[in-house]
Amino acid sequence: MARPFYERIRTAVANLGYVPRALTLVWQAVPGWTSVGLVLIALQGGLPAALVYLTKVLVDLLVAAKAAGGAWPLMRNLLIWGGAVGALLLLNELLTSISRWVRTAQAEYLHDHIRELIHDRAISADLGFYEQPEYYDHLHRARDESSHRSVELVGSLGQLLQSGITLVALAAVLIPYGIWLPLALLLSTGPAFFVVLRFSLRQHDWRRRNTPDERRTWYYDWLLTGVEAAPELRLFGLGRFFKDRYAVVRQRLRGEKLALARDQGVAEFSAALLALGVTGAVLAWMVWRVVRGAGTLGDIALFYQAFYQGQSLMRSLLGNLGQLYANSLFLGDLFLYLGLQPTVVDPVEASDKLGAIKSVAADLELRQVTFSYPGASRPALKDFDLTIMAGQIVAIVGANGAGKSTLVKLLCRFYDPQAGTISVGGVALREMPLAEVRRMMTVLFQEPMHYSTSVAENIEVGHDQSPARRERVQAAARAAGADTVIEKLPGGYDQLLGRWFAGGAELSAGEWQRIALARAFLRDSPILLLDEPTSAMDPWAEAEWLDHFRQIANGRTAVIITHRFTTARFADVIHVMDDGRIVESGTHDELLACGGRYAESWATQMKSKAASRTPSGGPAG
């Protein structure tokens, strides 16, 4: 529902603070190009007034030359002043071309500067922000609007300044005919300004209100065109379903947008009628004045051009002012996004014990840790206690939703727990710089990224390049069992992966997992965190990888999160999680002997495997 007009005015006044911030943003991004642009604007702003004045001179000279029968002195002056007009017109065209180039440069640099600000904020934002739909609304408006709004902001600013300079010059030309003429200009164009202001606010309100639905159309479009959903869309015949969903949302958005454009068109036409009436009345006054002998034909030409151009410029100036305000409103969404502050930050003063644990395996300890995801109804971990000794290989097992992957995220300090402490080597993670915490961890996530780059770059991405980098990459690939995959690719380590770009080769889920493992192993960190490292491997590949994993992990503290008991039994200690807590701990044999949850799950898994090997209807064994 539309807001009352007084609320719109109050919002407009409150949002005026975005205008200087937007202008400051332009200056910070492109100070040099902006300085050149201001000089060009000053030159272009004065040219129309000079042309208007020269038009009066030419008309009066032409009338005088005709009356004198084409006397040479008058014709010579006519040619000189005509040449001056031609020179100014040529200069205007030259300045227009240069200004277009300068504005393009300003817009491109400003676009890149804003993107850099967005990227900086995105990579520093808490992972918890991604749990909140409001964050995606902020990001969508900042990212989607900032590019073209920044370009429009530069254009509006340039036109505003240029129109202002020209208008001042034209007002100086008109004032001798009557001090009230500039006021008439303002009166004729004022309604157009209020139309721009009003509908700028309405468009901004509409965009903010409909951001979730605009993101929903993007989501439906992604489902219909992306490779991720393509198999299910075809198998289950979901294409029509999502097309209809897309069409319903788009129909409503389109209808509201067209209605807004219709209302704006009617209001602009009404404002134009008023301006036309004022122009006619003022022009009639000037003709009446000349008829009475109070002016010349040159005065009429000057007055008509000055008033007509002044009215156009006034509309342009007020329109550009409104557009500048509108663009600042939308860039206000950018400022809101950039103003999001992470809560997982570096400590004010780092612990003085960091030097002792930077490059050696260290104990991991969680004491009374309670953590809930933003907006969650129940905690993922509650009063959680766990100690992992330095150099141990520990397996964490449990059902889905038990909190296993949450443990990895907390150890990487993507989140801070609401209660309790997490420490490495006796130093709390909160007392360490974030970069230091993450340097100590090498992680294989449950769903690792597939980078559409070469094999070597997939493995070494983010690492400093050195002359021996290829040897290190190959060693990491061998450790992860990815070397056999890479040998089969036509380009070897230089082969482009993925289908995003021409010439790329797609890998199976298990092959991608091995590449991600190599990426994790390349990082020389004292703590290994592996979330389902063998989930996409077949039993033979899993057995081969486990055979040499202990050699890879030698001297490191390793935590393996897994559903596979064949992987878990390889660990020094197995911890069983349930409902955010450790409920059993011990070696594989010790846990079987206890006859608890682990033993029950082991028996069920073994029975399932035995049944799968038994021919239908035949006895097991």
Image (tube, rainbow, N blue to C red):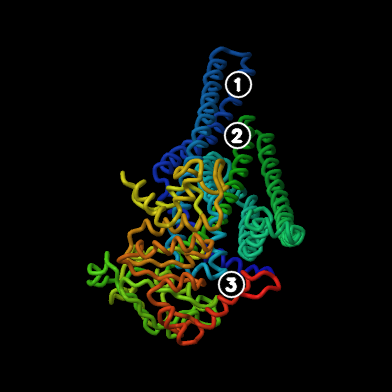
Secondary element under disc 2, as helix, strand or loop, is: helix
Q: Residue at x 63, y 73 (%)?
A: 611
**Numbered label attached to residue 609:** 3
Residue 579 seen in the figure: no
Seen in the picture, residue 526 relative to 99 is either above or below; the reply is below
Residue 56 seen in the figure: yes
Badge nearest the viewer, 1 or 3: 3
In-front residue for pair 578/179: 578
* Residue 331: percent from left, percent from top: 52, 57
Q: Which residue is mark 2?
A: 302
- Looking at the image, residue 29 sits to the left or right of residue 197; the answer is left
Separation of residues labelled 1 and 3 (CA atoms): 111 Å
Q: Which residue is mark 1?
A: 64
* Residue 485: percent from left, percent from top: 49, 50
Name the amino acid, label 3. Answer: Lys
Q: Residue 244 appears in which quarter of the rendering? A: bottom right
Secondary element under disc 1, as helix, strand or loop, is: helix
Separation of residues labelled 2 and 3 (CA atoms): 97 Å
* Residue 498: percent from left, percent from top: 55, 49
